[in-house]
Image (tube, grey):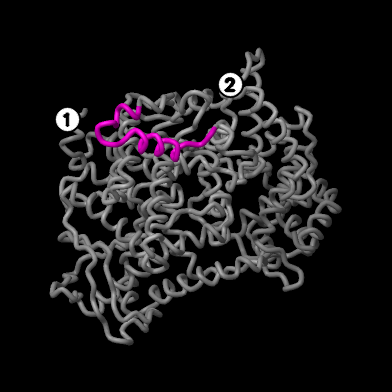
Amino acid sequence: MSPATDKLINDLIANRNFFEVHSARSENILLPRASEQLRSSIDALTNPSVDERVSAEEFLDLKNYFQLFALCEKKYECIVLLINQVDSHTARPLYYSSRVTEWIDVWSQIAKLNQTLEPLYDKNIKCRAEAILRLRSNGIEIILDQADAVLTEKVRIQILSRIKYRAEKVGHNLFLMVLHIIETKHYRPMHERYYFRKELSILSNSPQSPLGYLYQLSLAHLEKKKKNRDTFRQLKEIFELSEDLVTLMGVQRVDYLEGFMNKPVDLLPFLQKSTIHDQLFTLDQMNKQDALTLMDGLFSDCPSLAVYRDIYRAMIKHPGRQSLYFYKDLIVRELCMRHTAADVGNAIDELSFSSQEINLDYLNPLNIEKLNSFQKPFIKRKDDYLFPHPHFAHTGFIYTMYDKLLSSLKERNYKGARLSQEIGRRSEKLVENILSQYGVRYLAGKKYIVTKDFFDEIGSTAKEGECDFVIESPSHIMFIELKSKTLTANARSGNSISVLLDLALSLFTSIEQAGRHEYALRRKGKIDFTDGTSLDLKGRDIEKISLTVFDFNSLADVNLIQDLLAFIPSMKFFSKESDEQEELSKIKKVVDKLKMQQQCDVFREVYEKPYGRSINFGNRFFSVGQFMSILKYSRSTEHFVELINKTRQLGNNTRDWYYIFNNFVIDMPNHQGVFSRDYKQKT
């Protein structure tokens, strides 16, 4: 915290007796006048001088600090009341005064209103306070010193050492318990999907166990242990300790309204929390058939990789979703008609970790660099192999094949832009195959040429454009730009700059490129492609879609994307870390282009009409997996466009795109015109 914030905290505590006993209430005072005086005091509080101000971010820390003290130590409730009132009478200003006299003046005016005041506590803070009290009862000393220092390194080490001790004691039983909970509480058979992000109630919500973290931790402790009479108790303690740990980290979801109607100041912290929550509470997944479609689309023209895809086919033939223990010889015999025993055996070995290698030394939830389970799908044990789970194993196959492909391309002198183009070509071929499979009409790889200064108004020096995909219907034109970018380890561990950079190189860049196509189309009314064909506007709405090969999880939430694209162009980014300056410059470069597009005359003429569409209304973010989910229930190109547009109007606090889409499309059979014939036959 800044010196000004520290000073304010100390001054508020020093004057707590005043806040506790002061009750200058008068029955004769006129409430309207008292309200005016309060407004004047609030204005003075929220318009401080430069050297006497506390930022909005630090105000939140201050608020959390006093709420935790009130809940854990039964102290400073009167200061919580004061902060509640200030919060309710302001629209989250940029700054607050650090002068305690102005806070005293506000409290004096509040006292004149003759209100009965009760302290209100943030649900996340209440959840954190409960975790603190539970840990204290178990002998872990937690001192409330500063708002952001509840989880000190000492406390973290104590909790993690207890988790490690118990995990080593229970061994493979932790893996079995985690899978049992995932299977019994989170699987939806009709959707063939696990839903980890629960839908929150408006009343009260209990904290969740971080199953993503516990699953990864369990893979590092797969050795069978001798019979242990305390196994159940130790498993229970592992779940409780991990739950309390992530609660103190501030990544539990218990607030029904959190994330809705974000303000700019809330956006980066919410992005950070969402990314960490995805990492610790969920698992990357894809059903067997969709994963196979992905692998075939990316690698079908690589004969040397066929053995890996055939091994995957052999594994998913087995019914059920449970872990599979197998012997190498069984797979060799099953594939003997297509591959030699040596090729199959070598491929299985390349797809396997030893039980001592997988997630070695992984303990701290945010040490993402310790995780390697996504690199290979199998675990080699003493006599056999373990296939942990078919829904979570596709990344291991894809990673191995992708690594093999890169090595092969580099040996053939593919470098730099040429290498990127080859990877992009494969991704585009995958999308073409999927769209063709479901009968959606599209244009792909269409190029057009413009004059030298054509894009000057929107900050681009491009002399030509290339549309990855264009899909047309009588009412809409969709420009789809495909990116192969995924979330990096830094982003998954909660580095907000890395999260923004990954979004900038996927979502923002795609929307900027599609924005150029829209600009060209709206400015001229048509685009003439180099192959002699053309695309006419004909008064249709334009949708700009950023498509990624892999999921971005809750970052692809409809409401979050709208907030991001609305606020990011007006936000300023800075970092004290010198190694982040290059990342910030890349982000700023893309964001500046988006800002110029939003302010250009061509778009303002379209999007600033009364009751018109917002410029960001047609900006969307999907993964190939999400596209496949939509296409399964699509009957035609027009129906596909209709379903894409329906997803824009869907949202709830799970922020799980698949949960929202599947419940809307699949679980509402009375909704006319949505279902495919295949689904009706299934049901």
Q: Which residues are magenta?
A: 331-354
Residue at the image point whose x is 66% and y is 23% from the top: 169
Q: Check the image and report above or below for 429 versus 365.
A: below
Q: Check the image and report above or below for 519 versus 37.
A: below
The mark lying in front, picked from 1 and 2, is 2
Helix, strand or loop at label 1? It is helix
Quadrant of the snapshot with the C terminus: top left
Disc 2 crowd, CA 10 A, few/some/many (<14, 14-19, 20+): few
Q: Which residue is label 2 attached to?
A: 224
Residue at the image point whose x is 32% and y is 24% from the top: 319
Assess whether mark 2 and mark 1 are in contact (beta carbons under 8 angstroms): no
Q: Residue 393: where, in percent of width, then height? A: 42, 37
- Residue 207 seen by the camera: no
Disc 2 marks which amino acid?
Answer: Lys
Answer whether residue 347 is magenta in the image. yes
Looking at the image, the residue that sits furthest to the left is 532
Q: Residue 670: where, in percent of width, then height? A: 22, 35
Helix, strand or loop at label 2? It is loop
Q: In the rendered image, which quarter is residue 1 located in?
A: bottom right
Answer whether residue 426 is magenta in the image. no
Q: Residue 551: where, in percent of width, then height? A: 40, 49
Disc 1 marks which amino acid?
Answer: Gln
Residue at the image point whose x is 40% and y is 60% from the top: 411
**Left or right of residue 588, residue 651 in this image:** left
Q: Which residue is label 1 attached to?
A: 681
* Mark before the other along the chain sequence, 1 or 2: 2
